[in-house]
Amino acid sequence: MDIHPTAVVHSQAKISSGVKIGPYCLVGENVQIGKDTILDSHVVVDRETKIGERCRLFPFVSVGGAPQAIRYGGEPTRLTIGDDNVVREFVTINRGTVEGGGETKVGNGNLIMAYSHIAHDCQVGNRVIMANGSTLAGHIEVEDFAIVGGLVAIHQFVRVGCYAIIGGASAAPQDIPPYMVAAGNRARLFGLNTIGLKRHNFPEATMGALKQAYRILFRSHLPLHKALDRVEKEVPDLPEVRHLVDFLKKSKRGVCR
């Protein structure tokens, strides 16, 4: 490991081999940092935070800070960040709360761009992109391969489905279904994320089935429960279609349409 002499590292922090901690970084109590992770400079990793391997945290990142929740009273909660994440300048990621399960979690291979915020109890999947200034309120779930555009604000308890993309400067008060494009204030749907799905080599048959499901669910003017019944009867029974249906059935905040 390589720790700059101006860095302050708590005696109970666990630092793996190959870790580089740059000038004026602060690493708190019970922090764990996986091998080959880099803290550039002026990075704060607060207590009860676990960072995986091969991550890079750019200057002035602050992760593991206390949740911005009025009812938080100093209870022991945690933040877990997986492997191969890039966290750019001035990003903030907070620990969880007891009410939210006690853990904020970020998966693997994510790109979190400058000035973004991930609040308490969020669950961010793998290969997610959060563009500059995007904001997740508390208790948000973001599934794998989703893209959150710059300056997007997402309401607490909202879910963002896999392979969805939210256009810049949008406000999302309701769930964003998987595989879809959403934009606006308040956000509404603009069809299937065709370009994103092609980039991830989705078969034409799968994309065709998702387009058919989209038309029934969001352009038929049917009540959602009736549209879901039609999709289950008429659309090919593919894993992606089943995931879309299950996602909508489990919505608690309502669905962006």
Image (tube, rainbow, N blue to C red):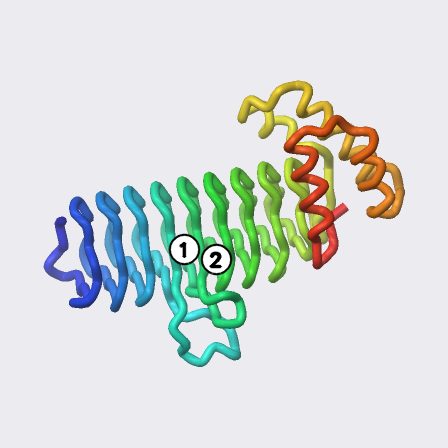
Three-letter amino acid code at the position of disc 2: Ile
The structure residue drawn at horizontal position 69% and vertical position 52%, both measured from the top left corner, is 250
Left or right of 81? Residue 152 is right
Residue 26 in view of the camera: yes
Query: Which of label 1 and label 2 is nearer to you?
Result: 2
Left or right: residue 63 compared with residue 172? left
Marker disc for residue 61: none
Q: Mark 1: give few (<14), some (14-19) or many (20+) Cα within 10 Å.
A: many
Instruction: Residue 16: give x, y in percent of width and height.
Output: 19, 50
* Earlier-in-chain disc, 1 versus 2: 1
Determine the CA span between mark 1 and mark 2: 8 Å
Say above or below: 169 vs 69. above
Give the vertical position of 75 relative to 27 (above or below).
below
Q: Which residue is mark 2?
A: 118
Instruction: Identify the element where label 2 is drawn.
Output: strand
The residue to which callout 1 is attached is 91
